Each structure stands twice: as C-alpha cells, then as structure tokens.
Amino acid sequence: MKPGNRHLCTVLILADLRQLFRVWEMREFMDINKPLSFLTSGFFTL
C-alpha cells in the first residue's frame, strides 16, 4: 500500500467518524427521523 493511499484512507475514516458524531449529537431532536438518518449514515459508509 502506498503512503498516499494510507493517508487518504485515514482522512476518509476521520471524516466518517466526524459524520457519526454529528449524527449522534443530532439524535435528540431527530428522534422521528432516526431510521432515515441511520440509513443515510450507513449509505455514506459504503
């Protein structure tokens, strides 16, 4: 694996973790849309 690829993978993982934390923070006032937000976050991790 090239160093550049590893760096890109790390950036993608960090961005994904930030997205997960944002979904976790918005969980309280998005209770109605919880299944939708869960599917959306799952879609972005594919």
Image (tube, grey):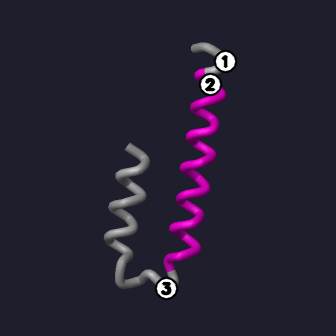
9 to 32, vertically: above or below: above
**Is most of the magenta stretch helix, strand or loop?**
helix
- Which residue does the numbered mark 1 point to in the structure image? 3
- Which residue does the numbered mark 3 point to in the structure image? 29
The span from disc 3 to disc 1 (Cα, nearest Å) is 41 Å
37 to 4, vertically: above or below: below
User: Which quadrant holds residue 6?
Assistant: top right
Q: Amino acid at mark 3?
A: Phe
Q: Amino acid at mark 1?
A: Pro
Extreme residue in the top direction: 2
- Which residue does the numbered mark 2 point to in the structure image? 6
What's the residue at 63%, 38% (across, down)? 11
Q: Which residues are magenta?
A: 5-27
**Label 2 neighbourhood size at 10 Å, few (<14), some (14-19), many (20+)?**
few
| Upstream in sequence: badge 3 or badge 1 | 1
x and y, in percent, of residue 35 in the image: 32, 71
Q: Is residue 30 magenta?
A: no
Q: Which element type, helix, strand or loop, lies under badge 3?
A: helix
Q: Which element type, helix, strand or loop, lies under badge 1?
A: helix
**Label 1 neighbourhood size at 10 Å, few (<14), some (14-19), many (20+)?**
few
| Upstream in sequence: badge 3 or badge 2 | 2
The N terminus - image quarter: top right
Question: In the picture provided, is 18 more to the left or to the right than 30?
Answer: right
What's the residue at 59%, 53% (across, down)? 17
Labels 1 and 2 touching (C-beta < 8 A): yes
Q: Which element type, helix, strand or loop, lies under badge 2?
A: helix
Q: Amino acid at mark 2?
A: Arg
Question: In the picture provided, is 6 more to the left or to the right than 40?
Answer: right
Labels 3 and 1 touching (C-beta < 8 A): no
